[in-house]
């Protein structure tokens, strides 16, 4: 799962979906809102098609699902499910790009603790503060919080809901990406000087599954050859890290 920078919608599109939310809110107060019908109708309009296009741009050239980073994202997903939270149905921060499998796993619910989501929102937070990667299995697992002496609650629930620790094809893809990224760093360390821009370009091209954040801001920074890169080439490391923020 990669950190996603949320882009702004074109002003006319933002105004149009704000109007759609206002209309939906009026219908909800009057007890006349059919959430599924309202969304289905709006989904065919230009503003929502434009919003989908912006989400696809945010997801990168391969337009990967914002949850798993593996499968192709094929439709708009409501982080706060629209059926239970119609007041967020057309709110731009609530819209993500999702693949069919993650959409099926997540369903129409959002786990909460004291009103706070226990699912990672990759457009609002760094997923690797809550998640970890196991190179041996290729699975995404919850990150262990040393201060709390426990697994992060958000990481645990995200893995559970999206089945990130038991999807065979997903795990195999993660392992392939790991081998590619590791090989690039090993090759760079053999050079007399490292061009950070060239290295990051190559790493981004190889990172099919959104693992770069794990190497540079997660627990991956402590394994080889990434630990050596961080220790022996601090400026290159910082340049790579900054390019991911």
Image (cartoon, rainbow, N blue to C red):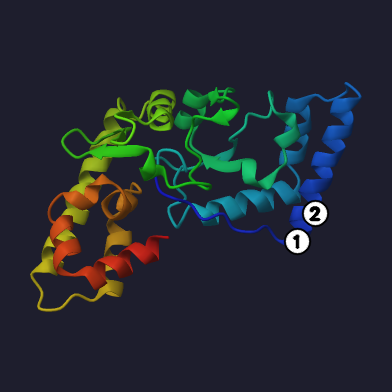
Report the residue marked by disc 1: 11
Report the disc number at residue 15: 2
Q: Quadrant of residue 131?
A: top left
Q: At x 76% / y 26%, what residue is drawn?
A: 35
Q: At x 48% / y 36%, what residue is drawn?
A: 99
Distance between the Cα atoms at labels 1 and 2? 6 Å
83 vs 215, nearest the viewer: 215
Report the disc number at residue 130: none
Q: At x 75% / y 55%, what residue is drawn?
A: 13
Q: Secondary structure at mark 1?
A: helix
Left or right: residue 186 compared with residue 172:
left
Residue 1 appears in the rendering: yes
Q: Quadrant of residue 197?
A: bottom left
Which image quadrant: the N terminus?
top left
* Number of residues whose C-alpha sits closer than 10 Å to that of mark 2, classed few (under 14), some (14–19) or many (20 or more): few
Which image quadrant: the C terminus?
bottom left
């Amino acid at each position: 799962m990669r950190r996603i920078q949320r882009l702004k919608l074109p002003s006319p599109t933002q105004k149009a979906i704000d109007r759609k939310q206002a209309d939906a809110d009026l219908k909800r107060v009057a007890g006349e809102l059919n959430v599924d019908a309202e969304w289905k109708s709006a989904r065919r309009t230009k503003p929502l098609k434009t919003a989908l296009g912006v989400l696809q741009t945010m997801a990168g050239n391969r337009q990967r699902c914002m949850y798993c980073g593996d499968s192709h994202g094929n439709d708009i997903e409501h982080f706060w499910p629209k059926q239970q939270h119609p007041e967020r149905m057309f709110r731009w921060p609530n819209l993500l790009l999702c693949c069919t499998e993650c959409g099926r796993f997540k369903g129409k619910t959002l786990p909460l603790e004291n009103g706070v989501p226990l699912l990672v929102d990759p457009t609002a937070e760094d997923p690797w503060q809550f998640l970890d990667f196991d190179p041996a299995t290729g699975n995404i697992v919850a990150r262990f919080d040393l201060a709390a002496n426990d697994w992060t609650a958000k990481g645990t629930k995200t893995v559970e809901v999206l089945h990130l620790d038991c999807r065979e094809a997903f795990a195999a893809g993660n392992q392939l990406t790991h081998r590619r990224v590791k090989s690039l760093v090993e090759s760079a360390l053999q050079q007399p000087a490292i061009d950070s821009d060239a290295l990051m370009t190559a790493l981004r091209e190889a990172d099919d599954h959104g693992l770069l954040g794990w190497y540079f801001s997660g627990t991956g920074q402590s394994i080889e050859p990434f630990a050596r890169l961080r220790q022996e080439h601090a400026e290159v490391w910082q340049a790579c890290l900054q390019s991911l923020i």
